[in-house]
Image (spheres, rainbow, N blue to C red):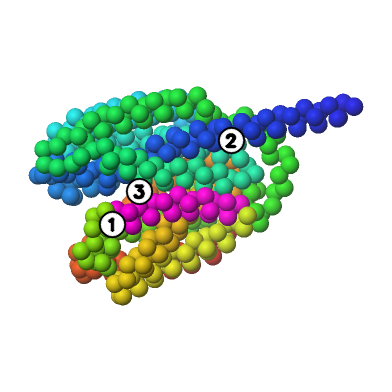
Amino acid sequence: MENNEYFTKTSDVKGTIKKMRWVYGVAGVLVLLFAGLVYAWSVLSSPIGEYFTDWSNTQLSFTFTLCMIFFCLGGLISGLLSEKVLPKIMLKLSAILFLAGFIIASRAQNVITLYIGYGVIAGLASGFAYNSVLGNITKFFPDCPGLISGILLMGFGFGSFLIGKIYQAFTPSGVGVEAWRNSFFVFGIILFAVMFISSFFIRKPTIDEIQIISEDIKQDSSKGKSKGADLEPKQMLKKASFWIYFVWAILLSAAGLAVVSQASGITVEVVEGISTGTISTVVGLISIFNGVGRVIFGGMYDRIGRLKTMLLNDVLFLASIFVLMIAIITGKFVFIIVGFILTGLSYGGVTPTNAAFVNDFYGIKYYSVNLSFITMNLLIASFGSTIAGILYDSTGSYFSTLIAMVAAIVCGFILTFMIKEEK
């Protein structure tokens, strides 16, 4: 009788936790949807560039480079403090930083102020929010870490596209037009409200909760479930598997960023005289399918495991590059559409694979901080866009960029087979 009562109570608790974790998941998607706004810099910067006509494209582009650097640093800091600082505190700090960063940027009269407001402060805020959500919500889903990572990261991917479109609709541009200042100010307030309110719905699970959810999960390596010992960051960093995967993530992320940053230029090279509106729509396909790809590949990792997921990502990336090559050779617009869709899907597959890989190989106990180390690959991968620009300046065609991407993905193929789980 006592065993039956215990079983009933445990089942009830498990059912409650499994219901509530989706509430946390929805809150996490909302947070990342808005935190991903910082990745819409190409859209946000356009009115700023038209207002400050004496600022060069290089100066404006460096704002996003700074944002990327401090996003990674923010994620690392959040991960290192994850055992000492509650996620709700980190999200409240993120709210304050977003408010301060966007207000400072809205009042910029020189590029240094913009760097500080958007590049440094907003970049840190986004990193804090990213790691606080992904590092804690994922722990509620030991049965499907890949899928939940993909769903959460879908919000992050869509944020730059959806909110960027809203910004475009309400922010007229032109010489002497200061509408962008009001938009930045309003976004600062909205980001503060979203982060602050959502902080009450984001928390880390207790050890008992993780055990209750996990007790009926079979540790099946073919399904990508966490099966290794919990490794501290210093132990993980000694593993060859970490560094091989880290380089793989750099190569694929750099390839993706190379296309993302040069998508408009590639479109113009294929179809001369194409309208600005059409370019914006076609380039937007990358963002849309980037979000879709995150969910697909996240769920795929849970079902078919690490090796097959990474191989499929490699193959899809190569296919996207070859289609874009055909587009440049033939000048056919349809190949641009297909190429950008495939690029979005394949590039979207990298981040949820990162998250699932960390959980799979190095356990859940130190997941938050271990994930932040994997995310640091973006610091190096971000130079993919710079390399793409240099190659174009040297050759006058983006075909050279695509050839370099092929080389990167082929190296990725080799690394995929080299990763082995170490005892």
Q: Crowding near pointer 2: few (<14 within 10 Å), some, many (20+)?
A: some
Report the front residue among 48 and 169: 169
Q: Is residue 286 magenta?
A: yes
Residue 332 or residue 294, whichever sits in front:
332
- Residue 67 at x, y percent in the picture: 30, 41
Q: Residue at x 41, y 29 (%)?
A: 194
User: Residue 318, percent across and down?
Assistant: 43, 67
Range drawn in magenta: 280-302
The quarter holding residue 304 reads bottom right
Amino acid at dot 2: Trp
Disc 3 marks which residue?
Answer: 379
- Of residue 329 and residue 279, the one placed in the foreground of this image is 279
Say which element carries label 3. helix
Say which residue label 1 marks: 279
**Mark nearer the N terminus (1 vs 2):** 2
Sequence-first tag of 3 and 2: 2
Q: Main secondary structure of the magenta part?
A: helix
Q: Say which element carries label 1.
A: helix
Identify residue type, mark 3: Leu
**Which residue occupies 18% across, 50% down?**
58
Q: How many marks?
A: 3
Q: Nearer the viewer, mark 3 or mark 1?
A: 1
The answer to if 274 sits in the magenta stretch is no
Q: Relative to 23, does residue 292 appear above or below in the rendering?
A: below
Q: Nearer the viewer, residue 385 or 153?
A: 153
Real-space Cα separation, disc 3 to disc 2, in angstroms: 32 Å
Query: Which of the two discs, 3 and 2, sits closer to the camera?
Result: 2
Image quadrant containing the N terminus: top right
Q: Residue at x 39, y 37 (%)?
A: 35
> What is the quadrant of residue 72 in the picture?
top left
* Sequence-wise first label, 3 or 1: 1
Q: Which residue is mark 2?
A: 22
